[in-house]
Amino acid sequence: MPERRFTLFLGALALMLASVPYLVGWLLTPTGHVYTGLTTNIDDSYVYLTWMRHVASGAFFQHNQFCAEPEARQTLLFNLWFLVLGTLSRALPPILVFHLARILGGAALLWAVARLLGLAVSDERARKLAFALVCFSAGLGWLIPGNPSLKPFAFAKATIDTFQHEAITFQSLYYSPLFAPATLAMVVFITALLRSEQTGKLRDTLPACLAGFLLGNSHTYDVIPLFAVALVWRLASDISQRKMSTVGWIRLVVIGAAALPSTAHIAYVLKTDAIFRARANETEPTYTSLLPWVLLGYGFLLPLGILGALQKTTPGRSLLICWAVVGVAVAYLPFEFQRKLLMGPHIPIALLAGIGLSTLAGKLSGDFPKILALFGVLITVPSNALLLLRDITRLQNNESGTAYRPYLSSDEASALAWLRESAPADSIVLVAPDPTSHTRFPNTPLMPHLAAAVPAHTRCISYNGHWSETKAYGRKLDETRRFFSQSTNDSQREALLVTHKIRYILYLNRLAGTDLGSYVPVDWAVGKQPGALHPVYTGSEVTIFEVSADD
């Protein structure tokens, strides 16, 4: 098959397979439910949808709709990519834009990988195998029984291909409208770096300048590994040639200068925005798994990649080796967000593995090269295949791997629609805890699963919204549980509502009669005093109460 057609076919197949769980989720929607359009890591996806909806409402700066503090409306934070998606969401449903961005961003990423292959790898068979491995490969997580990553928060000793979606290209295509475009910028950066080295022209660094600038704004972590790779490669090139390339260093300085404004802006916001800083400091550290578990997460790609790296050295191959080695190494720098730095290295490792697999196939004759090539690709696929099957299976139980559900009941969806259409923008909503959350995800009792959904589906602010986006989330979760406990008196409840200017309570009717006690807000005295409650939406499962303001 001609290479161009081969690339188009495999790329389309990868994007189609990455969309299958979402299609299944839509087709299997139970009677009386509404599909959210999400299958996994729903809490993070709600954050993306919130950003989009906020922009669609006319905002430019990225207010934190999961924080009730007034300072959250005074930020200078903005995200260029989500400004585009939010603008599109004015005309299209946000969840549709979410998936269009995921698919089109993934297509652009695979196109950029093909362009990089054309520059870095001269052999056609190696390019085809490398592209296939980028599209479909993962590691050995599927071979390890009782993999710790299947247990909540046990990531220190877990293969990255079973939980860290941004570390594996196929999983980036599947999961997020952010990861594939961010990885795209990384590939564009590396490709421009290589092209400018080959041509010696400063203008060929322009794509790297743009990519660095966009990464600084939208996924700032990635600036660290990219410039670490560029710096190490520049030093290695000079050492191997035994002379300093003045032009090469000038190109690197120009690229760094282009990325500086957007990166410095995020650093400035982190320093001056109290909410952004507090949220960053309070979020649980994301440390990288121990090195053996990271390497197992790449699996058979590693020995094949080492074989590919040992072939005749070219500038393209040396850059891929540098990206693979440095990309993994920087994930152990002393940052609390270590694990987030593992986005990207899968690509050079897969490209080198394609060279290695082609080298092995070239030593055979007859049909054996094709058989070995096919087997070499298929043996890297099971972790990704099992991940898709796992999420499809969870759909049948209305589970997602966290406490959040892929299907909302029709009444829950109607309640959110009421808030979206009737509640004033930026109204603060207190969401009742869900007494069944622990049945979907262990160790999460009474998690208010609709709290994260409120900003994603409405223009409102969630008081107890998101474990990593909400400032002092642990305290607010405790306050929520006490508020709905029978042992709490009404004056304490009133104090919470008035102090934090909470306007609505989204109450789950099944709380009545649970082990929380039999407190039902509608029994509260109704009047004009601050804190009195008035039902404004009454459904079979959800009741929304409006809180009287102080006249």
Image (cartoon, rainbow, N blue to C red):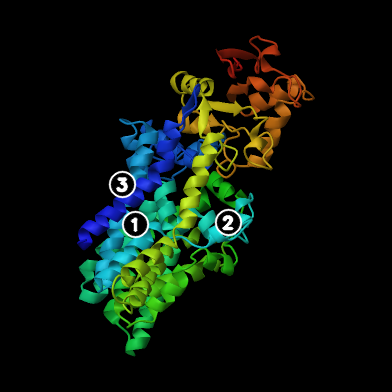
Q: Quick check: 17 left or right of 334?
A: left
Give the foreground label among 1 and 3: 3
x then y, percent, for residue 392: 49, 41
Type of amino acid under label 1? Leu
Type of amino acid under label 3? Leu
Q: Residues within 10 Å of mark 1 (few under 14, many from 20)?
A: many
**What residue appears at the point 46 percent right and 54 percent down from the top-left corner?**
384
**Among numbered discs 1 and 3, the one appearing first in the sequence:** 3
**What residue appears at the point 62 percent right and 61 percent down from the top-left corner?**
157
Give the foreground label among 3 and 2: 3
- Tell me, yes or no, if residue 290 can be seen here: yes
Residue 184 marker: 1
Q: Quick check: 94 left or right of 112?
A: right
**Image quadrant in which the N terminus is located:** bottom left
- In front of the other: 285 or 41: 41
x then y, percent, for residue 402: 58, 42
What residue is pinned by disc 3? 104
What residue is pinned by disc 2? 286
Type of amino acid under label 2? Thr
